[in-house]
Image (tube, grey):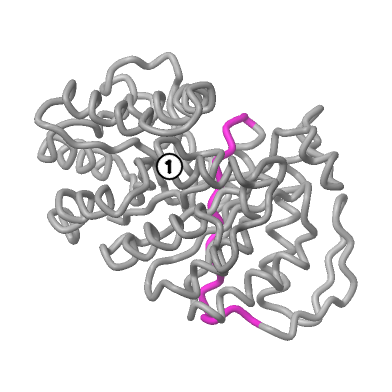
Amino acid sequence: MQFGLYAPVPHVTAGSQEIEQSIAGALSPLPPSEVDPAFALAREVLCAADRAGFDIILFAERHLGPDFEAWILAAAVSSWTRRIKTMTAVHPGLWHPTLVAKMAASLDRLTRGRTAINLVTGWNVEEHRMFGGDALLENDDRYLRAEEFVHVLRGMWSTSPFSYHGRFYQVHEAQLLLRPATADLPEIFTASRSPRGLDMVARTADWWFLDYDKAAQSVQQVMDSLRQSIDVMNEKAAHCRRKVRYAFNPFIAFGDSVAGATERAMQLLASDGSEAEVQKIMARIVAPAMKAGCVGPPAQVRDQLLAYRDMGIELFLFKLVPSKEQIAMVHDEIITPLRGAH
């Protein structure tokens, strides 16, 4: 079993005073000799996660907002960590794969092989247009583009000079004179959901972030939905003579009971920040993730994670309130008891 977490950034974080301070001051100069409070939080929490035995960090990408650029933040934090992997998000509609290949190889060598890619096919049309890209939402071309993107990445990492002639990318004898740190190339994670997106996952991804039917209300219904998704992907990947590994994103919180843990988590999430922004993040990210059954007494949460493990899920990328205290609780109640569980 592997364990990960999201880097605390504005568009995926609620309940953080540091994030709210960063947002409030984003359009003003920083006080002399101070770093942005969002970076201070990320460094503190993610270094604590590194020491606590977490395996991977996802640095989500949002350009139209007060978030730090994902690759810059990932590189800065990675200079402070020692063993945890860095998974950085990238939108093919905003980046050229030859450039990302160089960026990823650079980060991989700087971190001694601790780099992965989170491939995001994109949905924010305004953001793509503002920053010079195209989301391609009108049809399934974005999935073909994503497949070509990954093909170019892996080609650049393994062959020089490298040429590729696709529909979206034309590469002629490109040279990447800097290879990744290890013979095992950086892994590709993604979370596509549409039928054509699932084909893209089966053909190109190393890992797939599972989701479940939003109509699911009980933990059993969530598990049934996840099991169906795994069965579908196993069949699709087998047709491609590939194996896709599975990751899942539950919200995790502890208490003496499910109700007590839920109440405590809600208090932490709403403790800081504007009510409107917190409610938006709650509705989009936190509330759905709470349906996974990982909120409650620690023993119950561990049993639920083991049930997911037995279904074939290998990585749990936790959604949680970002603090050193929460990291310590996950270490004590989840990572230490379950590390090496069979």
Residue farthest to the bottom, as pictured: 177
Q: Quadrant of residue 260?
A: top left
Q: Please tell me whether residue 225 is drawn above or below residue 57 in the rendered image.
A: above
Q: Position of residue 90 (x, y in %)?
A: 66, 53
Relative side of 67 to 40, left or right: right
Q: Position of residue 150 (x, y in %)?
A: 68, 58
Relative side of 201 to 318, left or right: right
Residue 241 in view of the camera: no
Q: Residue at x 24, y 23 (%)?
A: 263
Q: Quadrant of residue 62?
A: top right
Quarter of the image that includes the N terminus: bottom left
Tag 1, which secondary structure? helix
Residue under label 1, please give it: 17
Q: Residue at x 76, y 40 (%)?
A: 142
- Badge 1 local density, few (<14 within 10 Å), some, or many (20+)? some
Q: Is residue 140 magenta?
A: no
Q: Please tell me whether residue 173 is drawn above or below residue 94 in the rendered image.
A: below
Relative side of 178 to 212, left or right: right
The residue type indicated by label 1 comes to: Gln
- Between 200 and 54, the one lying in front of the other is 54
Magenta stretch, residue numbers = 179-195
Residue 80 in view of the camera: yes
Q: Residue at x 30, y 28 (%)?
A: 267
Q: Quadrant of residue 139?
A: top right
Quarter of the image that includes the C terminus: bottom left
Please name the predominant secondary structure of the magenta segment in the image.
loop
Q: Residue at x 59, y 78 (%)?
A: 180
Q: Is residue 188 magenta?
A: yes
Q: Please tell me whether residue 125 is drawn above or below residue 259 in the rendered image.
A: below
Q: Position of residue 49 (x, y in %)?
A: 33, 60
Relative side of 209 to 339, left or right: right
Q: Position of residue 85 (x, y in %)?
A: 44, 66
